[in-house]
């Protein structure tokens, strides 16, 4: 994976290697940031921060970790720093949600699914958001969040069951 | 296949991880079990809503140009951020040493005055750097 980029780096063609990485990963990095920050404009700014850091450290890449692992680690750390620094997370008050309807089918139509999602633990929100953003690829989600695939599936199932409970309640 | 296993397989089916054989067993159980049938309908509707609501965000067309501009700005910065501070500290130290050696004044007076002047010039430099950075941004 990314052998072409690694060859370019070994030959000290850092700019070309960076361009390849940018083409290959910018959307995935953006989605990972978005799954953490949940705001597209801010996610785009942080995606730029991530690639700027990547541009600065790429000449020091030693090949020990895979490039994608390295990039996703920078992405998660940068996103979480932004989240902490700005107290960026906006939590919708539960009392602000519309009350569920008498039967769950009507309730599911009425309730904003994103509001329900925000009532789940943070890791479940990230996993379920990335799962749909990454075209239902458990493998991608696992790689991006550095979790085993089994753990991703477990978070997905818990999130789906919890959402169903919220709809029915 | 019992209810617990059926519901677990059903959740796995949203990840595309269920074989045709398992799907057949799943369908048979659901057709005979009202509780699992309700679970299946609710989960299918939830899956549909999540698919609709979690829309793939797009990077703006100016993303690449913006990033290139930031990289170009970094390239233009010939010195690291810490250099002015180190240069100031070194300069103040040398000036203070020379003053202590050459001026016909008691050492505590030279040192006290020197530290005050160094603090004042450092503050002035910090303000100047901050103003310049704001202008560049």
Image (tube, rainbow, N blue to C red):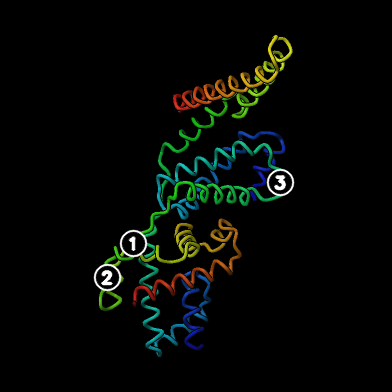
Could you tell me which chain the residue with mark 1 belongs to? A
- Marks 2/1: CA–CA distance: 13 Å
Could you tell me which chain the residue with mark 3 belongs to? A
Give the vertical position of A32 relative to B60 (above or below): below
Query: What number is the disc on residue A63?
Result: 3
Foreground of the two, B82 or B115: B115
Lower sequence index among marks 2 and 1: 1
State whether discs 1 and 3 lie on one chain. Answer: yes
State whether discs 2 and 1 lie on one chain. Answer: yes
Could you tell me which chain the residue with mark 2 belongs to? A
Q: Residue at x 69, y 34 (%)?
A: A12
Judge the density around disc 3: few (<14), some (14-19), many (≥20) Cα neighbours within 10 Å: few
- Marks 2/3: CA–CA distance: 53 Å
Lower sequence index among marks 1 and 3: 3
Residue A61 in picture, x, y percent from top left? 68, 42
- The residue under label 1 is A93
As helix, strand or loop, the secondary structure at mark 2 comes to loop
As helix, strand or loop, the secondary structure at mark 1 comes to loop
Query: What number is the disc on residue A99?
Result: 2
Residue A32 in picture, x, y percent from top left? 50, 53
Number of the front mark, 2 or 3: 2
As helix, strand or loop, the secondary structure at mark 3 comes to loop
Q: Residue at x 62, y 29 (%)?
A: B82
Number of the front mark, 1 or 3: 1
Judge the density around disc 2: few (<14), some (14-19), many (≥20) Cα neighbours within 10 Å: few
- Name the image quarter holding the C terminus of chain B: top left
For this orientation, the residue located farthest to the right is B101
Lower sequence index among marks 2 and 3: 3
- Marks 1/3: CA–CA distance: 46 Å
């Amino acid at each position: 994976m990314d052998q072409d980029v690694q060859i370019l780096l070994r030959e000290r063609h850092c700019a070309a290697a960076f361009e390849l990485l940018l083409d290959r990963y910018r959307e995935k990095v953006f989605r990972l940031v978005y799954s953490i920050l949940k705001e597209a404009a801010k996610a785009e700014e942080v995606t730029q921060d991530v690639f700027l850091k990547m541009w600065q450290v790429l000449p020091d890449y030693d090949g020990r970790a895979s490039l994608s692992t390295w990039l996703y680690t920078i992405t998660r750390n940068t996103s979480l720093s932004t989240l902490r620094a700005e107290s960026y997370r906006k939590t919708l008050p539960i009392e602000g949600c519309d009350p569920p309807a008498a039967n769950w089918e009507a309730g599911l139509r009425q309730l904003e699914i994103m509001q329900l999602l925000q009532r789940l633990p943070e890791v479940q929100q990230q996993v379920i958001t990335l799962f749909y953003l990454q075209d239902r690829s458990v493998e991608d989600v696992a790689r991006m969040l550095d979790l085993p695939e089994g753990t991703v599936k477990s978070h997905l199932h818990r999130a789906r069951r919890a959402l169903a409970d919220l709809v029915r309640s | 296949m019992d209810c617990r296993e059926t519901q677990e397989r059903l959740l796995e089916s949203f990840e595309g991880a269920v074989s045709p054989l398992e799907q057949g067993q799943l369908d048979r159980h659901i057709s005979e079990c009202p509780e699992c049938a309700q679970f299946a309908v609710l989960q299918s509707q939830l899956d549909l809503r999540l698919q609709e609501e979690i829309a793939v965000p797009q990077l703006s067309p100016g993303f690449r140009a913006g990033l290139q501009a930031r990289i170009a700005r970094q390239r233009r910065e010939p010195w690291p951020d810490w250099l002015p501070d180190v240069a100031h500290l070194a300069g103040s130290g040398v000036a203070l040493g020379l003053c202590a050696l050459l001026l016909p004044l008691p050492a505590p007076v030279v040192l006290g005055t020197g530290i005050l002047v160094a603090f004042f010039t450092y503050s002035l430099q910090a303000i100047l750097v901050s103003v310049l950075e704001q202008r560049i941004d």
